[in-house]
Amino acid sequence: MALSDPSGGRSGLALNTATLGHNLDGYGAGWPPERIIDACAERGLAGIVFWRREIGARAYEIGERVRAAGMQVAGLCRTPFITGQEAGTDGEIKASVEMAAALGTQVLTVVTGGTEPGTKGVIESQRILADRVGRIADYASGLGVSLALEPLNPMFGGNRTVLMSVNDALRVCDWIDAPNVGIAVDVYHVWWDTGLDDACAAAKGRVLGYHICDWLENTADMLLDRGMMGDGVADLKAIRHAVEKADFRGMCEVEVFSARDWWRREPEEVLDTMIERFETVC
Amino acid sequence: MALSDPSGGRSGLALNTATLGHNLDGYGAGWPPERIIDACAERGLAGIVFWRREIGARAYEIGERVRAAGMQVAGLCRTPFITGQEAGTDGEIKASVEMAAALGTQVLTVVTGGTEPGTKGVIESQRILADRVGRIADYASGLGVSLALEPLNPMFGGNRTVLMSVNDALRVCDWIDAPNVGIAVDVYHVWWDTGLDDACAAAKGRVLGYHICDWLENTADMLLDRGMMGDGVADLKAIRHAVEKADFRGMCEVEVFSARDWWRREPEEVLDTMIERFETVC
């Protein structure tokens, strides 16, 4: 498929700005949201997902600019932690919901945070998570915002997540039982799960986000060594098939944290590569 | 339970020598097998699990010394990798079986190795694993050795394992269908799995090893930052209950890779602490 064909696969493609490096620790080009919006629009992308740190008090203005460029704000990363030692307050969590609403996006991603102090295992923390998310679900619904619970790779258990699989996230969704609480499926976190097909079937209609990247055969860093699609061992077509069987019809969001490789490259090259890979290997 | 009570819980306890640091990268006390055997016997332990690197050509001699001290060799770590870029040859794998037999242990742990070159996902690699383990199962049976497939935490997918859960390991056991092929359950690798109870129930009679440690809330290194039992967030009693429901009647094997903490302490302190923790929190 030619890169110049705007009717191509990229019509279902969104950039998660983490892919351009956030300028974290000196990585990434440090582009402001406006420049990212222009570069994505030029390439015919369908949407952008931002992080709270990039938005500040400019949520409405940035959302309008994205829409004026012919795209959608496909999501916002993310709530403060909900559980664990570093959990945010209800007020801080609601403020992230308000930012999503001001941006004009329907999806706010939830990375849960870690194990609740004084507990062992994950089930008790999952119950506490369900209580706390349940408390803000109504508020978010009133603002038109859905909450996407994102299971993380089990290596992030302890201090970063209490959801290690789609099945875990689905269980917590069932406990909460609110129409605006669903699941985000991220290739990096679930690629290894041989039960993913069945889990996605059980999650029918509740997958709110699909994040793509690849798992490098020799992953050198837990957090910042994700691969570009096609460079790793994840079965990307099978995972996409699973989320589509779950009736997911949203955009595929490219989220590549890569301090060693992609964050050292020019943003234009990263964007062109992710489009080419999306159209050929995803 | 008093530490001086030799009839206490430690009668079901084994040391995996990795807990004393292997003298790896200058860590650990560098004790030879003989000194480890004496220190474990003095403390009333039931068994020891060695690593191939410690044994060399002295397998029979070391096994006899363990038994003369009133203990058993509870296992050998481990086969060369079976799959992936760094897979060993059939000859190398058989040599590890022969070492287990010469030590007089019935259990040889299998860490599978990574994704097969040219494949995506893990199922195809699991099928190749089943073929290769199936080829050596008969040979091992003739020497009285069982093969314990150990699922690893999914963070080790890519270059170190194609088994990410007890369910994965059980599927491969079913494909192989040999009476001397079973599963090793390691707390570090499975603590996060909310399906563990059901998986162990399905693995009834096929759990050949139970490795204990803890998952630290803030795990700083994937490989060498395991916690001593009680210092982390794993629900150790629930996991032990699950393996006992699977009819596991072997020893609990303490395996703590800890370059930052336990490998810097005196071996006597490590041994005394692991006994106390085993008797109180496991």
Image (tube, coloured by chain):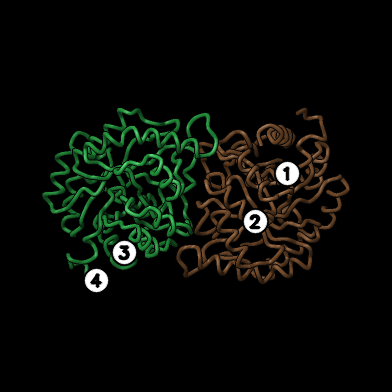
Chain colours: A green, B brown
Q: Which chain carries label 3?
A: A
C-alpha gap between disc 3 and disc 1:
49 Å
Q: Residues within 10 Å of mark 4 (few under 14, many from 20)?
A: few
* Residue that carries the numbered disc 2 in the rendered image: B183
Q: Are the residues under badges 1 and 2 in a single subunit?
A: yes
Q: Is mark 2 on a helix, strand or loop?
A: strand
Q: Where does the C terminus of chain B fall, quadrant-wise?
A: top right
Tell me if label 4 and label 1 are in contact, CB under 8 Å: no
Q: Where is residue B146 in the image (x, y as percent from the top left)?
A: 72, 60
Tell me: B217 left or right of B71.
left
* Residue that carries the numbered disc 1 in the rendered image: B15
Residue B1's mark? none
C-alpha gap between disc 1 and disc 2:
19 Å
Q: Would residue A264 be seen by someone viewing this image from the given angle?
A: no
C-alpha gap between disc 4 and disc 1:
59 Å
C-alpha gap between disc 2 and disc 3:
39 Å
* Residue that carries the numbered disc 3 in the rendered image: A277
Please name the amino acid that badge 3 sits on.
Answer: Arg
Q: Where is residue A164 in the image (x, y as percent from the top left)?
A: 46, 47
Q: What element carries label 1?
A: strand
Q: Which chain carries label 4?
A: A
